Amino acid sequence: METPVNEHILKLTGKASLPLALTMSKTYEVVLKGDITKTSDVDNQNGTINREYRFEPHHVEIVNDKGARIVGKDTSKTSQKIRSRHHIWTIDNASQLDYEWMGRQLVAHYDEVMELLKKLC
């Protein structure tokens, strides 16, 4: 029997480079788009768990009090983005294919992959 989940907790990680300064002690609306990159269960020692989800943004917008949007620049390296997307793909597809295997296949079939990408773009 699965342990009951008491709380679902979203943990935010990552950063974004902003083109403008923000003001301390001011409340902002923040719009995030990103991926859940890890889940973990924390035992509450009472027969329940808290399930934690790590969220890593790849798009950040700050909305100021006048409704203007300040768009942040994603500071993640391309390799980090690829690793994150592969991790999510393996979860979504219940796959055991690891990142190293994917890298070897990309190198071995590079020309074919590039031709496919040209057709998609």
Image: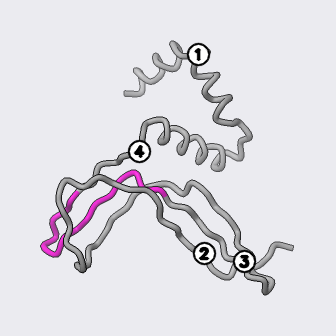
> Of label 2 and label 3, which has the lower sequence position?
2
- Which residue occupies the foreground of this view, 21 or 82? 21
Left or right, residue 117 beside residue 22: right
Mark identifier at residue 109: 1
Find residue 49 and name its label.
3
Residue nearest the observer in this picture, 24 or 63: 24
Q: What whole-number distance in Å separates the C-alpha atoms at marks 2 and 4?
A: 26 Å
Q: Report which residue position mark 4 lands on.
A: 76
Task: Identify which amino acid the numbered label 1 is placed on.
Answer: His
What label sits on residue 8 in the rendered view? 2
Amino acid type assigned to the residue bearing label 2 in the image: His
Image: magenta residue range = 56-70
Pointers 3 and 4 in contact (C-beta within 8 Å) = no
Residue 66 vs 13, above or below: the answer is below
Residue type at mark 4 is Ser
Left or right, 88 with reference to 118: right
Residue most extreme to the bottom: 46
